[in-house]
Image (cartoon, grey):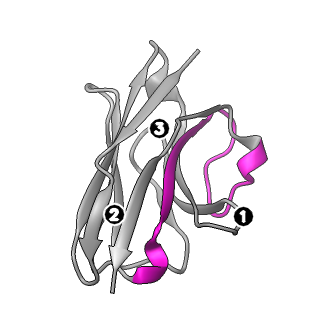
Amino acid sequence: QVQLVESGGGWVQAGGSLRLSCAASGRTFSSYCMNWFRQAPGKEREFVAAISWSVSSTYYADSVKGRFTISRDNAKNTVYLQMNSLKSEDTAVYYCAADEVYCGNYPRAGAMDYWGKGTLVTVSS
């Protein structure tokens, strides 16, 4: 069992930066692929980034590549999403999710084993 709690969301002007954190509880955190998804108002939940359990592989949606960086600290049971050069279209609720089986680009949201409750990011233009 893994419980996920996101933090770090807020309001920022376009071009600014935010860092999201996802704190996990559970002894097997390091064995999960950790993902960030987001959901904007009126839109489906979409993949943002993922990082393998060994930290050797990272994956990004094309829309955030070069602007966002995912990282994890297994000793702290925490995964991060550094978001730079934010745009108004990045406004969404950002969710942390854990997948025990698959780690790669564009995983299905329905395949995630665990979800956090989300943190709201608002980018003002």
Q: Is residue 122 above or below residue 1?
A: below
The foreground one among 98 and 44 is: 44
Q: Is residue 105 above or below residue 22?
A: below
Q: In the rendering, at what x and y percent does residue 24 appear?
A: 41, 26
Write down the quadrant of residue 111 in the picture: top right
Residue at mark 2 to residue at mark 1: CA–CA distance:
22 Å
The reply to whether residue 22 is visible in this rendering is yes
Q: Looking at this rendering, what residue extends furthest in the bottom direction?
A: 125
**Mark nearer the viewer, 3 or 2:** 2
Q: In the rendering, at what x and y percent does residue 44 appear?
A: 72, 64
Q: Is residue 63 magenta?
A: no
In the image, which disc is placed on residue 44?
Answer: 1
Instruction: Name the residue beneath numbered marker 3.
Output: 53
Q: Residues within 10 Å of mark 1 (few under 14, many from 20)?
A: few
Q: Quadrant of the N terminus?
A: top right
Instruction: Name the residue beneath numbered marker 2.
Output: 69
Q: Which residues are magenta?
A: 88-110
Residue at mark 3 to residue at mark 1: CA–CA distance:
26 Å
Q: In the rendering, at what x and y percent does residue 117 appear?
A: 53, 37
Report the residue at 22% width, 69% height from top. 17
Q: In the rendering, at what x and y percent does residue 4 appear?
A: 47, 29
